[in-house]
Image (cartoon, rainbow, N blue to C red):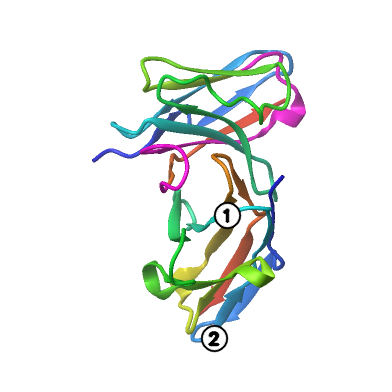
Amino acid sequence: AQSVSQHNHHVILSEAASLELGCNYSYGGTVNLFWYVQYPGQHLQLLLKYFSGDPLVKGIKGFEAEFIKSKFSFNLRKPSVQWSDTAEYFCAVMGSYIPTFGRGTSLIVHP
Amino acid sequence: GAGVSQSPSNKVTEKGKDVELRCDPISGHTALYWYRQSLGQGLEFLIYFQGNSAPDKSGLPSDRFSAERTGGSVSTLTIQRTQQEDSAVYLCASSLVVGKETQYFGPGTRLLVL
């Protein structure tokens, strides 16, 4: 069985602060990894994804994530957050055809 | 083009009643997923359809839950004899095929069982 753990449930930052959201997963085989974001009042949408190749992947709006296989981690980062990054962030792992999502991290950025 | 749509956007029902939730996927997407999101929880997988293959129902929490997909397009999730613990947001997503492809989510149906 696969599982996903997001360590930070609520994060509050000021604009221009750096962001790192943790995501750890457990699965015995090859996985595909995703970060989805849900802005207030909007649908869930893809932020970035990793399938293979360069473990550092870049997504929309300046976000990036690094896949560290030895640590079973796929942490999301952004060097300088903006007020518009206020949203709910979900990490997801797909080992087979069924994705498993983490509980989500609520990020609030103060202007 | 049009995204994934779901209806109704909100549904209030009484305990014991049946409800039907509808999902219209993106045209051409062969894969369709249903999820449930309870307050403060992540997305819980319920069921997925891939083309004309038999659906994977492994996430359905009880036999009160069922889903069908007609003509490889529109899907309906039915909850029979609703219980208060069924209150949640039900999300639908579609993708080109199952697996690696990006999933495109609908706005969800917020279900409240009184």
| Secondary-structure class at tag 2 | loop
The three-letter code of the residue at mark 2 reads Ala
Instruction: Between residue B33 and residue B77, name the one nearer to us.
Output: B33
Q: Nearer the viewer, residue B99 or B13?
A: B99
Q: Quadrant of residue B25?
A: top left
Mark carried by residue A82: none
Front residue of this view, candidates A106 and B96:
B96
Quadrant showing the C terminus of chain B: top right
Return the x and y of residue B52 as percentages of the image width and height: 42, 19
Binning the other alpha carbons within 10 Å of mark 1 as few (below 14), some (14 to 19) or many (20 upward) gives few
Distance Cα–Cα, label 1 vs label 2: 34 Å
Q: Is residue B63 left or right of residue B26?
A: right
Q: Quadrant of residue B4?
A: top left
Q: Could you tell me residue B28's position as x and y percent?
A: 29, 32
Q: Which residue is mark 2?
A: A17
B2 is within the stretch colored magenta = no
Expressed as whole percent of the image width and height from the top left, the position of residue B92 reads: 49, 35
Left or right of A16? Residue B3 is left
- Residue at 36% from the left image edge and 38% from the top image edge: B96
Q: Nearer the viewer, mark 1 or mark 2?
A: 1
Q: Which residue is mark 1?
A: A30
Name the image quarter holding the N terminus of chain B. top left
Residue at 68% across, 71% down: A71
Q: Is residue A41 above or below residue A75?
A: above
Give x and y (percent) for residue A20.
Answer: 59, 77
Answer few, some or many: residues within 10 Å of disc 2's Cα (few below 14, many 20 plus, some between 14 and 19): few
Over which residues does the magenta segment extend? B79-102
**How many numbered marks does the figure carry?**
2
